[in-house]
Image: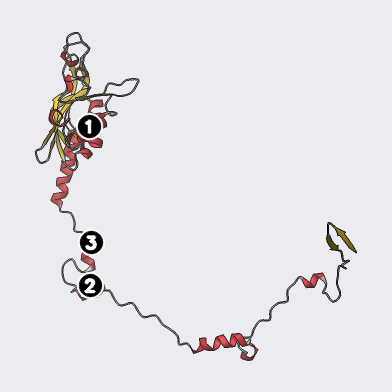
Amino acid sequence: MRLVRGGFLICFAALSPVTAGAKPLETSLVPVARPIADTNNVTAMPALLLASAAPIAAIPKIQPKLRPESPQVMAAAARPADLPLLSPDVSLKPYLRPETLEQEILFKKRKLRKNSVCGDIAIQGKPVGKVPGKIKACGIKDAVQITSVSGVRLSRPSTMDCGTAIALNNWVDKSVKPTFKRRGPIVELQVAAHYACRTRNNRKGARVSEHGKGRAIDISGFKMADGEVVTVLNGWRKNPSQKQLIKVWRGACGPFGTVLGPNSDRYHRDHFHLDTARYRSGPYCR
């Protein structure tokens, strides 16, 4: 049947489901299995396979060459076994630590434990107990006298409470020592003031200072192992000390509740005032 539409000729042819000579559906969709070549029977192999197999059989087997021994292995094998520190039973075993050295280390640890306060071996000093004050708001309930924190000594024994001692130890360990590591190491904190029953900035009628409560310490300088001293007064405005002093000043803001430096007022132009007073708004740092 023919149908002409829009200038196109469309032809339809009636196709029967099974054309003449075609195989049934169940057999035409299944491919015929390829016969397996018998490799033992050379005559049965295809000509192409025989053509490709002939050169392969002619190629000799290639065996990899053994890797030569390294000079290190050969030198080690040539060493006399009786030489010290060369035979495996000697070189692979560390020397026993001398008993004197072991006793010295244990003695130092016992000494540090004995002189530690506030439950931290890194805080060295002695307990003082209750410290009364001349003014009613002054005094410390459980005071300690600190001589060193985190391996850094204080220029003079300083009296404070444990909260302030712990804050001082954390500040020195996390900020002061890393900051002065290349320039130092730091060996001493120069203490300008610690416990003192007085008003703020020694002004009449002012509130009692945190120094009078054992919660403050003033640091005026940092002494290095080679004897160099970085002071707040001389280093705050000069490089490279300025950058390092600003860094340790910022590092104190957090461990301490109040941090005052040369930028705060004229009373602190030559030292850092650090105290553990806490405020609802967070640390006060200037």
Could you tell whether 52 is left or right of 236 in the image? Answer: right
Marks 1 and 3, Cα distance to the nearest angstrom?
49 Å
Question: Which percent across, then down, holds residue 154?
Answer: 14, 31
In primary-sequence order, the first of circles 2 and 3 is 2
Task: Label 2, secondary structure: give it.
Answer: helix
Please report the residue visible at 27 percent of the width from the left and 21 percent of the height from the top.
277
Which amino acid, mark 3? Lys
Task: Identify the residue under disc 3.
Answer: 93
Task: Identify the residue under disc 1.
Answer: 246
Task: Label 1, secondary structure: give it.
Answer: helix
The answer to the question of whether label 1 and label 3 lie on touching residues, with beta carbons closer than 8 A, is no
Quadrant hosting residue 82? bottom left
- Asked if one can make out residue 20 in the rendered structure from this viewpoint, the answer is yes
Mark 1 Cα-neighbour bin, 10 Å: few <14, some 14–19, many ≥20 = some
Marks 2 and 3, Cα distance to the nearest angstrom?
17 Å
Quarter of the image where the N terminus is located: bottom right
Quadrant hosting residue 116? top left
The answer to the question of whether label 1 and label 2 lie on touching residues, with beta carbons closer than 8 A, is no
Task: Identify the residue under disc 2.
Answer: 76
Marks 1 and 2, Cα distance to the nearest angstrom?
56 Å
- Among all residues in the image, which is located at the extreme front? 7
Which amino acid, mark 1? Ile
Please report the residue visible at 26 percent of the width from the left and 31 percent of the height from the top.
250
Above or below residue 119? Residue 96 is: below
Which amino acid, mark 2? Ala
Question: Which percent across, then down, holds residue 62?
Answer: 43, 83
Quarter of the image where the C terminus is located: top left
Task: Label 3, secondary structure: give it.
Answer: loop
Q: Nearer the viewer, residue 230 or 156?
A: 230
